[in-house]
């Protein structure tokens, strides 16, 4: 059973969460999902939750990742008062900042048939070297290097990994490229089927919930995570993280091998530090096709 098929089955039974979990567990048993990429939990959470409610024009929802300590406290207090550590809930408050570095894979052979043949071009491999050098030169204490399981993202991550010895490499199916949500305004050159938005949209939203959230209260130190994935996924993540209308994702452009930084404070505040930075690459190495 392919990953896509597993997801379709899961979607088909979205009404019955038990069946959904079974489908995802079956997929999990077949080894599609790595240790750090728990599709079962994330998908179950997506379908159990209300459909995402986009905030109003002027509002900022502090509980956007459902990890706002005050909301969690209130929920638990109702069930078991006094059973949650210190009275002021200090232990339950996140303290660390998460720095998330989103990298668009570098240039690949567009003529390849299917994912396996869509491998990096020689220029694409060079671009990934520049990105790897840049990340190493920044000298941050990276915790993990997660990448989409698609060939072009895996290849890009492997090249970057050479420059970051000792940083764990993790592959994840949730991060694969897709059609996150119908873009507004619509474009004529790109028209996926409605069913594709339906399937990919839920998966990419699941990826967002899995990776983009404030630190866990147990996290003591700030963390730096690298995620190598795809332009549509990154643009959707940026819209969602900033609480901008997600339909606007296609209004942004990202260079191959570029770096997008998100900072998530313990309070739930989010800042976009850079979008598609590729200033570290010599101009002749930027792909313009
Ligand atoms: C990145 O490379 C792909 C081919 O791999 C190409 O279609 C795309 O236009 C490039 N993007 C930019 C911004 O250069």
Image (cartoon, rainbow, N blue to C red):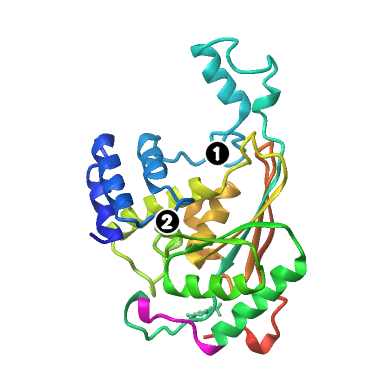
Query: Is disc 2 surrounded by few (<14), some (14 to 19) or many (20+) residues within 10 Å?
Result: many
Q: Is residue 257 left or right of residue 194?
A: right
Q: Residue at x 60, y 85 (%)?
A: 126
Q: Quadrant location of residue 6?
A: bottom left
Q: Position of residue 85 (x, y in %)?
A: 64, 18
Q: Quadrant of the N terminus?
A: bottom left
Q: Is residue 104 visible?
A: yes
Q: Determine the secondary structure under disc 1.
A: loop
- Judging by the rendered image, the residue that carries numbered circle 2 is 174
Q: Determine the secondary structure under disc 2.
A: helix
Observer-nearest of 262 and 44: 44
Query: Is disc 1 surrounded by few (<14), some (14 to 19) or many (20+) residues within 10 Å?
Result: some
Q: Which residues are magenta?
A: 116-122
Q: Is residue 58 above or below residue 166?
A: above
Q: Residue at x 49, y 47 (%)?
A: 210
Mark drawn on residue 65: 1
């Amino acid at each position: 059973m392919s990953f896509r098929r597993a997801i379709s089955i899961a979607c088909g039974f979205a009404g019955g969460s038990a069946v959904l979990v079974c489908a995802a567990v079956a997929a999990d048993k077949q080894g599609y999902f790595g240790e750090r990429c728990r599709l079962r939990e994330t998908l179950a959470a997506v379908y159990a939750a209300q459909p995402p409610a986009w905030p109003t024009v002027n509002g900022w929802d502090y509980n956007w990742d459902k990890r706002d300590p005050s909301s969690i406290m209130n929920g638990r207090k109702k069930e078991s008062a006094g059973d949650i550590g210190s009275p002021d809930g200090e232990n339950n408050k996140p303290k660390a900042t998460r720095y998330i570095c989103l990298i668009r894979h570098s240039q690949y052979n567009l003529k390849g048939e299917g994912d396996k043949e869509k491998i990096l071009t020689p220029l694409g491999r060079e671009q990934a070297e520049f990105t790897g050098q840049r990340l190493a030169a920044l000298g941050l204490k990276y915790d993990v290097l997660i990448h989409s399981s698609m060939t072009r993202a895996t290849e890009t991550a492997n090249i970057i990994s050479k420059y970051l010895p000792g940083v764990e490499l993790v592959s994840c199916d949730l991060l694969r490229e897709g059609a996150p949500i119908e873009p507004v305004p619509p474009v004529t050159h790109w028209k996926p089927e409605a069913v594709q938005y339906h399937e990919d949209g839920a998966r990419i939203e699941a990826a967002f919930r899995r990776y983009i959230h404030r630190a866990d209260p147990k996290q003591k130190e700030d963390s730096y995570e690298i995620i190598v994935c795809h332009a549509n996924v990154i643009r959707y993540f940026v819209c969602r993280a900033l609480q901008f209308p997600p339909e606007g994702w296609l209004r942004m452009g990202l260079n191959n091998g570029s770096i997008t930084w998100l900072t998530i404070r313990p309070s739930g505040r989010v800042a976009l530090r850079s979008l598609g930075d590729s200033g570290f690459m010599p101009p002749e190495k930027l792909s313009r096709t």
